[in-house]
Amino acid sequence: MKTGIFYGSTTGNTESAAQMLCAAISGSHATPIGDAEKADLEACDLLILGASTWGLGDLQDDWADSLTLLSSADLKGKKVALFGLGDQETYSGTFVDGIKELHDAALEAGATIVGKCSGDGYEFQESAAFIDGRFLGLPLDEENQADLTEERIRIWVDQVLQEAK
C-alpha cells in the first residue's frame, strides 16, 4: 500500500508530527502540501493529511491555499486519515477545527475516511472536528500534552493501517 503523508506547517510542530508518522509507517513519504500536485495525492492508496488550526478555527495557510487541490483530486477508492494540531486550553472552542476542513475536502474528492479517535484524554469546549463523540482524526496538542504525542501516534498508526486494509 503506497502511503503519502501531506502536511502544512508554520511553526514546525505539524512537520515534526508528520515525520514521526513517516518513521512509524515503513515505505511512506512526507511532503509539505505546498510542494504537492494532484498526481501526488492520486498516486497514494492511503493519504495521511495533517494541519494545524490557527486563531479562532482557521486552517493553516499552506492548506488554505491547497484545499482546492485536495477536493479536485480523484480519491475514489482511496483511504484518508487526518491529524491536526491545536491548543485545547487557549483555543478550547476551536480545538483542531482544521481537521474538519480537510475531512470535507477529502470526502468531496471521493475518499473514505479512516482513523477516527475518541475524545478521551482531551479537555476542550468545542471542536468542529468532534462529531458524535469522536474526532474525525488524530488531535495532537504540543502546547499542553506534548508528552502524549508519540504514544498517541503509535496507537493511531496501528488503527489506521488496520482500517486501511
Image (cartoon, helix red, strand yellow):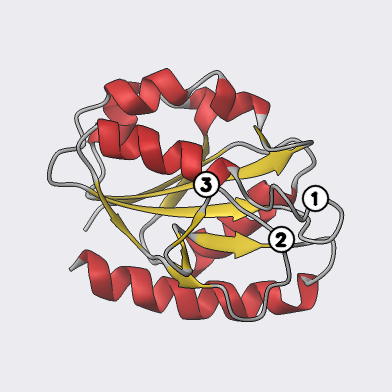
Q: Is residue 1 left or right of residue 34?
A: left
Q: Nearer the viewer, mark 1 or mark 2?
A: 2
Where 134 falls versus 148 (above or below)?
A: above
The residue at which mark 1 appears reads as 91
Q: Amino acid at mark 2?
A: Gln
Which secondary structure lies at badge 2?
loop
How many callouts does the rendering have?
3
Where 58 falls versus 87 (above or below)?
A: above
Circle 3 crowding by C-alpha within 10 Å: few under 14, some 14–19, many from 20: many
Q: Return the x and y of residue 60 as percentages of the image width and height.
A: 66, 32
Q: Which residue is at a point 87% across and 54% down the rendered structure image?
A: 90
Q: Which residue is at a point 53% across and 55% down the rendered structure image?
A: 83
Q: Amino acid at mark 3?
A: Ile
The residue at which mark 3 appears reads as 99
Q: Report the Cα–Cα distance between label 1 and label 2.
A: 9 Å
Which quadrant of the view contains residue 34? top right
Q: Is residue 17 left or right of residue 48?
A: right
